[in-house]
Amino acid sequence: MSAARRSRTPPSQAIRRRGFLLVLSSPSGAGKTTITRRLLQRDPGLSLSVSVTTRPRRPNEIDGRDYRFVDQATFDRMVEQGELLEHATVFGHSYGTPRAVVDAAIAKGRDIVTDIDWQGTQQISSKAGADIVTVFVLPPSKEALESRLRSRAQDSDAVVAQRMAKSAEEMSHWPEYAYVIVNDDLDKSVAEVHAIVIAERLKRERQTGLADFVTLLRGG
């Protein structure tokens, strides 16, 4: 192959790609938020979709990093103006995923991750189509789930009992997800989700520049 022909062939890393939204869901306490944070540390190609919520900020949370904390009037306005990809009410508080940041990232070939419940996942799935990758995280046992909820020391006994009662309903939605993992070991769970991310990036339909790349490889 001539030097001129070699110079026309772009490196494989330059193939244009459409990004995707990675959604992690689980019952409260099963580990979706911790897995999400570890995944972001592990893969610089992922960015976080910061949800908006009306619930009070916890002591260790930072506005704009963990959530965007807004009042109910602001949240309702965002819903009315179509600014949210999904929204739901959980334990008396509203949660939602801002649309603009997610749409812009996907269009630019970047991958974005969020952890939301099954209701929000259903809403996004109906809108995003192939741009969404869904993962459901199960706890290793009911006892482990309750232990994790109590170890957080952020909720009263009544709230823990309420979350445990709701977990059975939440876990019934696992068949609606493309991937399911059991979070019995955090490091293993993070590695499994990261393997999903890598595989999804290689899907032929996401690599929008693949046809041009192959054409050049073939001498076109």
Image (cartoon, helix red, strand yellow):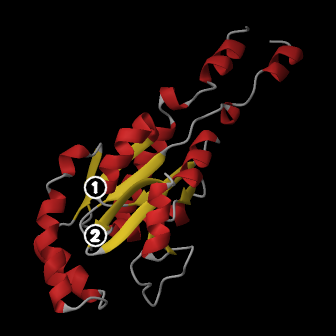
Q: Please identify the quarter of the rendering in which residue 158 is found.
A: bottom left
Lower sequence index among marks 1 and 2 = 2
Q: Where the N terminus falls, by quadrant?
A: top right
**Crowding at label 2, few (<14), some or many (≥20) Cα neighbours within 10 Å?**
few
Q: Where the C terminus falls, by quadrant?
A: top right
Residue 36: horizontal and vertical position, in percent?
43, 64
Of 139 and 118, the residue lying toward us: 118
Q: Is residue 120 above or below residue 12?
A: below
Q: Is residue 182 above or below residue 209?
A: below
Of 108 and 56, the residue lying toward us: 56
Q: Which residue is at 88% across, 18% downward?
A: 3
Q: Which residue is at 72% across, 15% downward?
A: 216
Of 161 and 55, the residue lying toward us: 55
Q: Which residue is at 15% across, 79% downward?
A: 162
The residue that disc 1 covers is 119
Do labels 1 and 2 touch, CB within 8 Å? yes
Residue type (three-letter) at the residue carrying disc 1: Gln
**Crowding at label 1, few (<14), some or many (≥20) Cα neighbours within 10 Å?**
some
Residue 170: horizontal and vertical position, in percent?
18, 61
3D distance between C-alphas at marks 1 and 2: 10 Å
Q: Which residue is at 57% across, 43% downward?
A: 106
User: Is 91 placed left or right of 86 in the picture?
Assistant: left
Q: Is residue 189 above or below residue 21?
A: below
Mark 2 residue element: strand
The residue that disc 2 covers is 90
Q: Is residue 95 visible?
A: yes
Residue 167: horizontal and vertical position, in percent?
16, 67
